[in-house]
Image (cartoon, rainbow, N blue to C red):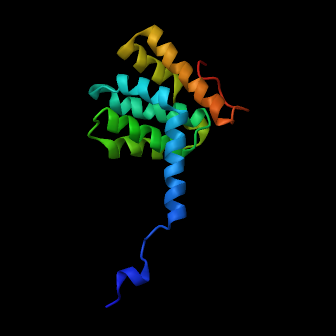
């Protein structure tokens, strides 16, 4: 038998762990307001659709898949969503599609208006614009209110 410690199977090094932690912390810092507002709207009967629309909106604003997964996972944990795997699958499915196939704004807006009212929904949608501005990838992307 081989001693697992000497082989080092699947043991990430300190640098990899540091980089993963840095990515999570930076994502949470950049998107904290958006996450907080979405947690408030993340109600059981709407979570599946919200996961789809939020994933689409993040994709269309230039947020990478890793960041989107961090954001959705954080929302699920804070909202005590018991179906985390389903929500993360929504992110995976969204990022697997071509950008033209991704649905986002109209569905997200409609869902949010139902949940939190028109004024609060518009404010939350504008946080996606702030996310877009922070991402530095604003060229050629659709405006979040279109």
Q: Residue at x 35, y 86 (%)?
A: 3
Q: Residue at x 31, y 91 (%)?
A: 1
Vertically, is 58 above or below 10?
above
Q: Residue at x 43, y 71 (%)?
A: 10
Residue 59 rendering spot, x and y as whole percentages: 56, 37
Query: In the image, is 126 to the left or to the right of 137?
Result: left
Residue positioned most to the bottom:
1
Vertically, is 114 above or below 44?
above
Towards the viewer: 59 or 123: 123
Query: In the image, is 77 to the left or to the right of 68?
Result: left
Q: Quadrant of residue 30?
A: top right
Query: In the image, is 70 to the left or to the right of 99?
Result: left
Residue positioned most to the right:
139
**Residue 94 appears in view:** no
Towards the viewer: 33 or 129: 33
Quadrant holding the C terminus: top right
Counting labels gives 0
**Residue 112 appears in view:** yes
Vertically, is 103 above or below 91?
above
Residue 129 rendering spot, x and y as whole percentages: 60, 24
Residue 37 rendering spot, x and y as whole percentages: 43, 23
Q: Residue at x 50, y 64 (%)?
A: 14
Residue 32 rendering spot, x and y as whole percentages: 48, 31
Towards the viewer: 56 or 26: 26
């Amino acid at each position: 038998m081989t001693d697992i410690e000497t082989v080092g199977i699947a043991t990430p090094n300190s640098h990899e762990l540091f980089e993963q932690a840095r990515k999570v912390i930076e994502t949470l810092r950049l998107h904290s307001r958006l996450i907080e507002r979405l947690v408030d709207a993340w109600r059981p009967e709407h979570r599946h659709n919200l996961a789809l629309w939020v994933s689409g909106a993040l994709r269309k604003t230039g947020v990478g898949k890793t960041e989107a997964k961090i954001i959705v996972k954080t929302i699920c944990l804070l909202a005590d969503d018991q179906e985390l795997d389903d929500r993360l699958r929504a992110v995976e499915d969204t990022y697997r599609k071509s950008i033209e196939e991704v649905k986002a704004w109209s569905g997200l807006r409609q869902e949010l208006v139902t949940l939190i009212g028109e004024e609060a929904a518009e404010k939350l949608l504008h946080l996606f614009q702030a996310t877009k501005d922070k991402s530095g990838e604003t060229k050629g992307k659709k405006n979040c209110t279109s």
